[in-house]
Image (spheres, helix red, strand yellow):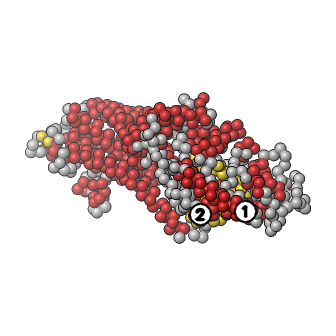
Amino acid sequence: MASSSPINANNYLGWNPNLTSRRSPFPLLGNKEKNDEIDHLEEIKNTNSSFEAAGVFLTWEDLWVTVGSSGTDKTIIQGLNGYAQHGEILAIMGPSGSGKSTLLDALAGRLALNTRLSGLIKVNGQKQTLALGTSAYVAQDDALTTTLTVKESVYYSAMLQLPDSMTVSEKKQRAETTIKEMGLQEAMNTRIGGWSGKGLSGGQKRRVSICIEILKRPKLLFLDEPTSGLDSAASYHVMNRIVKLSQQCGMTVIASIHQPSNEVFALFHNLCLLSSGRTVYFGPASATDEFFTLNGFPCQSMRNPSDHYLRTINKDFDNDDDIEKGLAQNKPVTTEEAINILIESYKSSQFFQQVHYQVSEISKTEWGVLEKGSQASFLTQSFVLTRRSFINMYRDLGYYWLRLGIYVSLCLCIGTMFYDIGHDTGSVQARGAMLMFVASFLTFMSIGGFPSFVEDVMIFGRERLNGHYGVAAFVVGNTLSSIPYLLIISVIPGAIAYYLIGLHKGFEHFLFFVLVIFASVMLVESLMMLVASIVPNYLMGIIIGAGIQGIMILNAGFFRLPDEIPNPFWKYPMYYIGFQRYAIEGLYKNEFEELSFPRNQGSSSSIITGEEILETIWQMPTGYSKWIDMIILLGMVVLYRLMFISIIKISEKIKPILQTLLVA
C-alpha cells in the first residue's frame, strides 16, 4: 500500500477550512465572520413564526457511558463531543463494538437501566428531554405486525400518528406516498411475514420500519443501521430520500451505519468515526479522506473509502504480518498504533477546535423549548388500534384459532367422559370435578397465546417510545379487539360440554356458565399482560404465568375445602385474592342451586337440596348471589389491566430517577 509522510500529532495543522464549507454553520473564521454567523442563527430564529421551522440542534459534551456494577464497570463511550443540526445527516461509523449504537441510544435517551451516563446533552442549547412525538428512532431489529400487509402497516401507523386535523384521505395519501418513496409499491399488498408464513425480505422490512417513522416528518430522526439488509442500490435510494426529507422538512438526522457504499457516503454531511468508544474523527465527511492521508493512511484507488477507514481502525483481526497500514518510514504499524496516531492527530487538529466552537455557539443561542408534537386523539387511536389488533388476531392462528381447536377437543372429551351425568348421588361429586376442570384447565390453556401477545407488547413498546400512542389506548384496543374471539372460544366449546353432560337446564344457567368461562379466560389474559409488562420474554413469562395460576388453582377451595385451608397465608389473603375461587364458586352456585339429589341410604331425609350441598359438601357461602362472583371476576379484569397501565407509567417515571442514582 502506498504511504505518505505522517503528520505529527503535535504539529498537525494541515486542515483546509474550505473542506468544512459543506453546510457547516460555524466555520473557523475571523471575528467579523463569526459575528455574521451568529447573527444568521438569530435571523433563523426570529424570522420563523414557529420553532418547528428552525428545526433541532443537538449537542453533546464530554459524554461517557459505563455499563455494569461497581468493580466490573466497562466503559463504552469515552469523552465524546459533537453536534447535529437540522437539514443535515450525521453519520456515526466504526467497527463492531465501537459504541455506535450506544452513542445513538444515549442521544435518544434510550440507554438501558444498567448503564451510567455522564456528560452534557443539550437540545437547542438547553438541557431538556425530547418531547413526545418530536423524535423517531428506527432500531436495528424490526418490530412489525407480521400478519399485516405493507400498505396496512403504514396506513394504520399514519392513522395513529398524524393529527385529526388531517382527513382520512390525506393520511392515506401520505402513507401511499411514503411507501413509494421507499420503493415498496410493488410489495404494498404483501404481508410482513413471520413464523406462520414467508413475507417480505429483511431489507424490505427495514424499509417498512423507516416508512413508519418518517410518516410524521419528525424533527429529530435516529437511524440505527438503516441500510442493513439492503443492496447498494436500495441503500442509496433510501438514504437519498432521507437526505431530501431532512432538507425539505428541516429534520435533524443521526444515523449509525456500517460500510456504506461510495454513493451513500457522499450523501453524509458530517461523520463521527469511533473506535473503542473514542473519537477518531468528527467533521465534514468530505474531509475524512484528506485527514487519513495527511496522517499516513491514504485510501488506495478503487477502494471504498468507508471500508478503508474501518479497516484502518478495526482491532478485531489485527495481525502484524498482514498489516497494510504504513507510515513515511515504510514501517508497518499495528492497528492500535494507527488508532492512537489518528486520535492524537484529531485532538490537535482544527477539526477538534471546530467541534468545540460550534457546540459552544449553539449552546449560547436560546432556541426555545421543544414542544410536543400533535397526534391523533385518544378515541381515534383506540379505534385504529382495535381494528388493527382485531385483524392481527384473525390472521394469527396462534392467537385464538389454535386455542379454539384445542378447547373444542377438550370439551368433546369432557362431554363424552361425563355424558348425560344424571341426578343420582354420585353425580354430585362428578359435577364438582367437571366444573373444577372447566374453571381451571380451560383457563390455564389461555397462557398458550402469550407468545403472540408478547409480540404485540414489543411492538407497543417500540411505537410508544416513538410517541405513536399511549398505554391507555393500547389497553383499550387490545381489550375490545379480543372480546369477540374470547366469546367464540367460550360459547362454542362451552355449549358442547354443557349439553353433552346435561347440566342444569335453562338458558340463564347456560349463559352464566359461558360468562364465567369468558371472564376467567379474559382474566388470565389480563394476568399475562401484567407478566409481560415485567418479564417480556416468551419462556420466562409462560413459566411465571403458569406458576401463578397453579397457586390460584391449588387454593381455589376444591383440593382443600375452604374451612380446611391453613392460615394465615393460604386463607388470608390468598384464598380471597385468587380469581379461581370466584370462578368455581360461581359455577357451583349456578349448577347446584334449585336442584335436588337423593341422599345416601341411612339419612333421615331422602332428598338433599343444592343449597345444602354447597354449604355442607363444598363449604361455599350462599348468602350472596352467583352474580356477585361474576362482578368480582369482571372487576379483577379491569383491575389487572389498570395495573398494567400503572406499571408501564411508573416504570417510565422511575427509570430516569434510577439512572440518576446510579450515576451518583
Q: Vertically, is 496 above or below 93?
A: above
| Residue at disc 1, secondary structure | loop
**Apparent side of residue 83 relative to residue 480 in the rendered image (left or right):** right
Give the image location of residue 92, x and y in percent: 67, 53
Give the image location of residue 536, x and y in percent: 48, 51
- Identified at 25% across, 46% down, the residue is 631
Residue 364 badge? 2
| Residue at disc 2, secondary structure | helix
Q: 392 or 20, which is in the foreground? A: 20
Neighbours of disc 1 within 10 Å: few (<14), some (14-19), many (20+)? few
Neighbours of disc 2 within 10 Å: few (<14), some (14-19), many (20+)? few
Residue at mark 1 to residue at mark 2: CA–CA distance = 18 Å
Q: Quadrant of residue 114?
A: bottom right
- Identified at 63% across, 59% down, the residue is 38
For badge 1, the amino acid type reads: Gly
For badge 2, the amino acid type reads: Lys
Which residue bears the numbered disc 1?
A: 30
**Which mark is first along the chain, 2 or 1?**
1
Decide if residue 398 is in sight here.
no
Decide if residue 270 is in sight here.
yes
